[in-house]
């Protein structure tokens, strides 16, 4: 019995065990390299997203740097918000305010303005999500 065990130990300690260990080491190195590449890709995606957000912030800061561009959204949005708030409150609570309808072109424009303010960010997010799905 000890002779077979001695022979088995010599056989395994020869070239076979070394080859198996070298093969396992190479497989682990390949897996590590693959994970390293995936991590680098993820890091680059995060950097790209941060760069995109920084560019958006820079544009916003540039727009807000001038009085006229800083006031554009509030000058359109706040009066419309007050008007639609009055219409909704008058409709819900049956006040006798009799809020007048906006004239024809301004009523249409107000819908476009509200849509642009509230839907543009959502549309951008949906487009970005669909673009990411297309890449995967």
Image: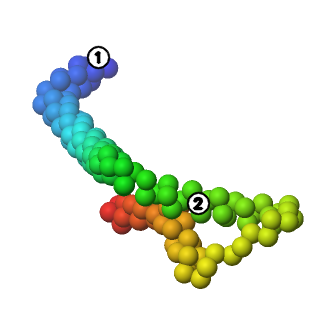
Query: Of residues 61 and 39, which is closer to you in this image?
Result: 61
Which SS class for mark 1?
Answer: helix
Within the image, what quadrant is residue 13 found in? Answer: top left
CA–CA distance in space, label 1 to label 2? 97 Å
Examine the rendering and report whether any part of residue 32 can be seen: yes
In the displayed orientation, state which residue is furthest to the left: 15
Q: Which residue is mark 1?
A: 2
Give residue 68's position: percent from left, percent from top.
Answer: 37, 55
Query: Of residues 41 and 94, which is closer to you in this image?
Result: 94
Please say if 46 is above or below 111.
above
Please say if 44 is above or below 103.
above
Crowding at label 2, few (<14), some or many (≥20) Cα neighbours within 10 Å? few
**Marks 1 and 2, the one that precedes in the sequence:** 1
Within the image, what quadrant is residue 87 found in? Answer: bottom right
* Residue at x 42%, y 62% (from the top left corner): 124
* Residue at x 54%, y 59% (from the top left corner): 77
In the displayed orientation, state which residue is furthest to the bottom: 104
Crowding at label 1, few (<14), some or many (≥20) Cα neighbours within 10 Å? few
* Residue at x 28%, y 21% (from the top left corner): 5
Give residue 79's position: percent from left, percent from top.
Answer: 59, 60
* Residue at x 72%, y 73% (from the top left corner): 100
Give residue 101's position: percent from left, percent from top.
Answer: 69, 76
Q: Which residue is mark 2?
A: 79
């Amino acid at each position: 019995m000890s002779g077979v065990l001695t022979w088995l130990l010599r056989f395994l300690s020869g070239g076979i065990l070394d080859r198996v260990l070298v093969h396992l080491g190479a497989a682990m190195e390949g897996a590590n390299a693959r994970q390293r590449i995936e991590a680098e890709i993820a890091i680059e995606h995060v950097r790209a997203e941060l760069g995109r957000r920084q560019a958006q912030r820079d544009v916003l800061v540039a727009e807000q740097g001038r009085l006229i561009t800083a006031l554009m959204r509030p000058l359109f949005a706040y009066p419309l918000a007050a008007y639609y708030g009055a219409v909704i409150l008058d409709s819900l609570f049956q006040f006798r305010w009799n809020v007048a309808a906006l004239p024809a072109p301004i009523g249409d424009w107000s819908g476009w303005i509200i849509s642009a303010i509230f839907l543009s960010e959502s549309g951008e997010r949906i487009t970005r999500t669909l673009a990411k799905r297309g890449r995967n």
